[in-house]
Amino acid sequence: MLYNSTQNNSNVVSSAQAIAQGISEEGGLFVPQSFPQFTLTDIENMLSMSYQDRAKAVFEKYLTDFTADEISDCVTKAYTEEKFESKNPAPLTHVDYNGKELNILELWHGPTCAFKDMALQILPHLLTKSLKKTADGVNAVILVATSGDTGKAALEGFKDVKNTKIIVFYPENGVSAMQKHQMNTQAGENVYVCAIKGNFDDAQTGVKQIFTNPENSEILKKHNMMFSSANSINWGRLLPQIVYYVSAYCDMVNSGKIALGDKINVVVPTGNFGNILAAYYAREMGIPVNKFICASNSNNVLTDFINTGVYDKNRSFYTTISPSMDILVSSNLERLLYKLADNDDTLVSDLMNKLKKDGVYEVNAEIKDRIKSAFYGGFCDEDNTKLTIKNLFDSQKYLCDTHTAVAVAVYDSYVNETGDKTPSVIASTASPYKFSKSVLEALSSDLLPDSEFDMVDMLFDISNTTVPAPIAQLKGLEPRFANVTEKDNMKQAVLTALGID
Ligand SMILES: *Cc1c(COP(=O)(O)O)cnc(C)c1O
């Protein structure tokens, strides 16, 4: 199995290279040249497997330059009961809502309580093995710019992983109190956390500049180090996400909700388009899916794109109560376009250049049709998000977070609009305790306490749900990091963190 760049088909790499490198040199993203197939018999064989064995079955098809032992080692170390609360890290829960059945795929039982853990718990293992194959003996320096969830999940994944160092930058005033506390209390000998005086875009730009300046790579090289990425542009983050859609399909069959071979719908609260793309890739491999329902918040650039074929980021940016979906440039959409354009790298690179230059592009009629036949796009505003949390809790005693609520609301309107009765899997992307304030505001009109942990206690009292251990354990922890730097000084912060200034 080899991988192409979406913007230059002659850039061909192995999976280890794709993972170690992160992004292709001309700026394209690595994608598999073709999609390996699961027949219905293959799927039938997976029904009785554990999540871990299903993961191995998927990985073996893509990581053909890894041995079975190497894959097994990565999977066994990543998806442990200790890290994910139970043997199945991605359990399905069934609840009724407005006369519809929701099959909720809970992806937030990992160490940082967001679905990012599903990929970032295994990425460090994939990456260190990839480095060994492609650049043996070199230490990887992972640079991350985060608006909250990715930073913590990457820190937790890479903490004390041999031959790696991880440095996370976050906007000083752009993350929630809980997210800041999660990052600044991070344990591990190889981790470094730094706030910047600026917003998320400044952090992202700063990291990109450090990455792409050859002078910096030279400095690192002298110290036997190289930069690498834990962003969702890395194939090593996308691949683990395919697994839970394959696994969810098996669990839908096992629970009797569908018969083997029946189609399901998949509903995903979407930001950077990585999670829903993984579901699409699962269908390319043979998992029977009818529709992909792409749910956005008020930043509804994807809803418009699916409906019109025009991608236009020239619009107001809204800061919402589902902050992990506050995004106007969904970077993984590039991979979908490449697939829908039958691997036409010139077409993709033209569209991406238009996006860079004008902030807008339009796809041709054929691609438009292909998108419409596979995807439904919808969005949900703040009031409806809160109302959905309240209705779901009041009627079913099921507590969901603000991102998942967006997906539930959009699915509700999809069914009302289309009458489609296909059994549907809803991706649930975060624990409600990560967004206690907004969830409490949805449930109760009482005055809220000031402290984040008092809000956690209040949510526990109201909902009678379990506080995830990783959040409960943060209470009373002293921060290890209090670094703040000017946005123009990030390079120096990196060198200081690495001890090579
Ligand atoms: C990252 C994130 C999303 C968006 O996922 P994408 O793969 O970027 O589309 C949704 N919900 C939560 C809680 C997230 O952390």
Image (cartoon, rainbow, N blue to C red):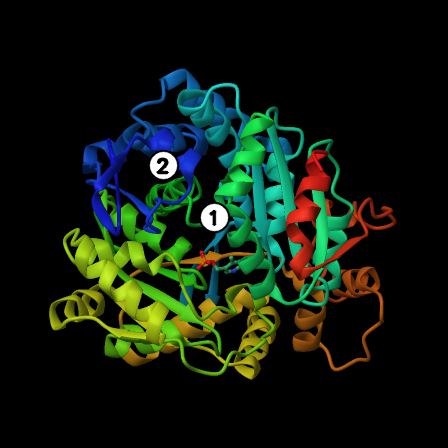
List the single residue furthest toward the left.
366
Residue 49, image x, y percentages? 38, 29
Q: Which of labels 1 and 2 is toward the front? A: 1
Disc 1 target residue:
212
Element class at badge 1: helix
Residue 207 in sight from this viewpoint: yes
- Choose between 381 and 289: the one closer to the eye: 381
Q: Is residue 160 left or right of residue 363?
A: right
Residue at the spot x=35%, y=49% of the render? Answer: 278
Residue 380, image x, y percentages? 47, 78
CB under 8 Å between discs 1 and 2:
no
Note whether 265 is above or below 130 in the view shown: below
User: Would you identify the image quadrant in which residue 80 lies?
Assistant: top right
Q: Is residue 200 left or right of residue 370?
A: right
Element class at badge 2: helix
User: Would you identify the image quadrant in which residue 290 lies?
Assistant: bottom left
Q: Is residue 41 left or right of residue 64?
A: left
Residue at the spot x=40%, y=54% of the render? Answer: 274
Residue 467 in sight from this viewpoint: no
Circle on res. 18? 2
The numbered mark, 1 or 2, whose residue comes first in the sequence reads 2
Density class for disc 1 (Cα within 10 Å; few <14, some 14-19, many ≥20) is few
